Image (cartoon, rainbow, N blue to C red):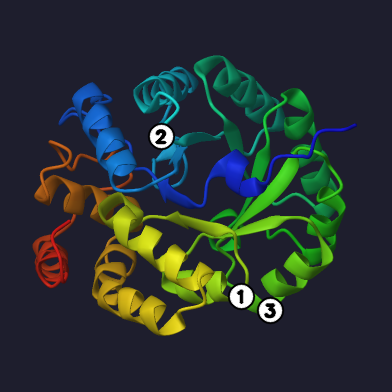
Amino acid sequence: MTAPQPSAAQLFGTNLVAMVTPMQPGGALSEPGIASLVDHLVNSGCDGIVVAGTTGESPTLSEAETARLIGTVAERVAGRARVVAGVGTYDTAASVHRAQEAVAAGADALLLVSPYYSKPTQAGLVAHCVAVADATELPVMLYDIPTRTGTPFEAATLVELADHPRIRAVKDAKGDLFEAMSLMARTPLAYYCGSDDLNLPYLACGATGLVSVIGNLVAHRNAELIRAVRTGDLDAARAIHTPLIPLVEAIMHTSQGAIMAKAALAESGIIPHATVRLPLVESPPPHLRRLSAALAGMAAPI
């Protein structure tokens, strides 16, 4: 008798955090910062850590740094959460190689963004995703964020890719909730909200979980939000969600998510430095003041 296939929640987790990549003032990876952040995330109720994604400044990480980062996180996590490695680039061969490196580094799953800048056709997008999914035995979460990549996953493309046995989920930062609901109904793909602005409505409409930037600070609140929606208590879910709105605004609607999340983590003493790599630059004082106010306004300490 064939064993039941693991669920997306088992493969990826439900309360995922798009982890920043802690760096030293000169820009090198910060091993102490990585260790401190991983412990903070796991202890806060995060059950999946996305490493080397957009918030992790993946375009500025070399292949060697990416493999080292994934390995360091996987070793520190030690099975306490799923490690989902970002491997997508605009080059299919490079993405395949990064996927194989992620396996060697100890990743549990892969995050695959649509190729950016080159703007492939949907047929090319399918071929790219299949090539990466075929390169390892790890489950794959597609990452749909056309505002950054220029290339959306069209609905028909997602229906086609859903037939691949290792393509199991979508991190949806497109923000088309109706399309997401339609595809959840038509395919076995699990949906994860990839935009903190929309965490509550996506969960209410059936998303399996979140891939959250503010989760770097408030993974415990996201866990409470997921639990409230799962138990059907939408009043409680709104009560959890509403106080998070100023933090979402401060982190996601000022400088940029990675920049502001690092600033918040440094201000909270979770990582030692808020260093980012060019072309990103650290937050200006007005944004930091807005961030400080949002952190101070949280109903309970981080």
Please tell me whether mark 2 or mark 1 is closer to you in this view. Answer: 1
| C-alpha separation, residue under disc 3 versus residue under disc 2 | 34 Å
In what element is the residue under mark 1? loop
| C-alpha separation, residue under disc 2 versus residue under disc 1 | 35 Å
The quadrant the C terminus occupies is bottom left
From the viewer's perspective, tell me whether residue 77 is left or right of residue 109.
left
Could you tell me if residue 278 is visible in this image? Answer: no
Front-most of residues 166 and 129:
166
Amino acid beneath label 1: Cys
Q: Which residue is mark 2?
A: 60
| C-alpha separation, residue under disc 3 versus residue under disc 1 | 9 Å
Mark 3 surroundings: few (<14), some (14-19) or many (≥20) residues within 10 A: few
From the viewer's perspective, tell me whether residue 32 is left or right of residue 119.
left
Could you tell me if residue 57 is visible in this image? Answer: yes
Mark 1 surroundings: few (<14), some (14-19) or many (≥20) residues within 10 A: some
Q: Position of residue 257 (x, y in %)?
A: 34, 57
The quadrant the N terminus occupies is top right
**Quarter of the view holding residue 102:** top right
Circle on res. 178 = 3
Amino acid beneath label 3: Phe
Residue at 72 percent across and 24 percent down: it is 136
